[in-house]
Image (cartoon, rainbow, N blue to C red):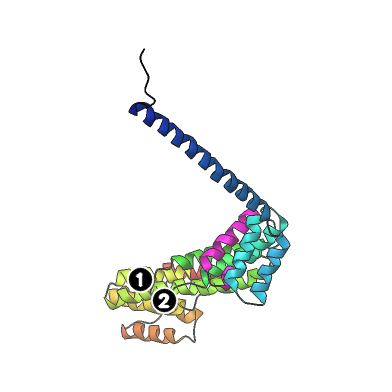
Amino acid sequence: MTVRSAKTDPATFWARLASGIRRHALLLLLVLVVPLAGCAAKDDLQIPDDPADKLYNEGLYLLQQKRDYKDAAKKFEEVDRQHPYSDWARKALIMQAYAYYEAKEYDDSINAATRYVTLHPGSSDAAYAQFLIASSYFDVIPDVTRDQARTDKAMSALDEVVRKYPNSEYATNAKKKLDIARDQLAGREMMVGRYYLERKDYTGAINRFKIVVTQYQTTRHVEEALMRLTESYMALGIVPEAQTAAAVLGHNFPDSRWYQDAYRLVRTGGAEPNENKDSWISKLFKKRSA
């Protein structure tokens, strides 16, 4: 009879050991995971949303009492995040735009105000939201030596206030800012025109001064633009156009110091200010006065 040894062969021993390790590892994993899942569920239940009015009033307190505009804006953001589509969220959104504006975080103010206008176009605060967009662009208009893309955006947004909400309290203010923005753009054209004039690129200069008198006639730069047109046309020997520019300047701005300069320029060339009715300058100002 063959006697079996009580000693297990090596292959069987290692197989049983691996199986046992897997069973213990699985049990240990279950022991760890179940309590963690329970804690997570318990924590979720213990962190309810804050009441919308509480968040909103905390934002007002930070805004009005602490002048902490950035933190106030974040509180108003929480109202929208925790209570979307509520009336509190609508109120908080316009306050968020205002808080960011006061914090000089203009891009954030534009984003919040744009979202408000998109979501609530018929609201009584839509005009103010549009005005915040325009003011955010307007307040960072660069000087005339730099690119004026921001000024163009400001003008577009300000025009939107005047066009969409003509009877609102913001329309009058928007019109004043529009005048300032136009003056800025005219100033940019004048700067470039003078640059060309100094370098005796008279055609380039005329083109720039022409933009001023055609597009920005209500700005303070139009007087100088007419004088510079007189100067440029005289330099090119196009005397009739120089005479017309000087005559139109004298007719519309008789007390202007720029007219005195234009008058001297024309007289130095042996001519007098005389309006040519067929000139584009004459037609332009005739149309304006009609």
Residue found 37% across the figure and 73% down from its top: 241
Which of the marked residues, 2 or 1, is nearer the chain's N terminus? Answer: 1
Residue placed under numbered mark 1 in the picture:
206
The answer to whether one can see residue 290 in this image is: no
Magenta span: chief secondary structure: helix
Q: Residues within 10 Å of mark 1 (few under 14, many from 20)?
A: many
In the shown orientation, is residue 234 left or right of residue 277?
A: left
Q: Position of residue 150 (x, y in %)?
A: 46, 67
Label of residue 49 in the image:
none
Snapshot quadrant of residue 176: bottom right
- What's the residue type where badge 1 is placed? Ile
The magenta stretch spans which residues? 98-120
Residue 243 lies, in percent from the top left, at 38, 77
Who's the residue at 65% across and 69% down the image? 170
Instruction: Say if 163 sits above or below 13 in the image.
Output: below
Residue 104 drawn in magenta: yes
Residue 181 can be seen in this image: yes
Q: Assess whether mark 1 and mark 2 are in contact (beta carbons under 8 angstroms).
A: no
The answer to whether residue 200 is above or below residue 162 is below
Q: Residue at x 55, y 40 (%)?
A: 30
Residue 163, position as x, y percentages in the image: 62, 62
Q: CA distance from mark 2 to mark 1?
A: 9 Å
- Is 45 colored magenta in this rendering? no
Secondary element type, mark 2: helix
Q: Nearer the viewer, residue 43 or 127?
A: 43
Residue 68 position, x and y percent, is 60, 74
In the image, 179 versus 224, the foreground residue is 179
Q: Farthest residue to the top: give it.
A: 1
Q: Residue at x 44, y 78 (%)?
A: 247
Q: Helix, strand, or loop for circle 1?
A: helix
Residue that carries the numbered disc 2 in the rendered image: 225
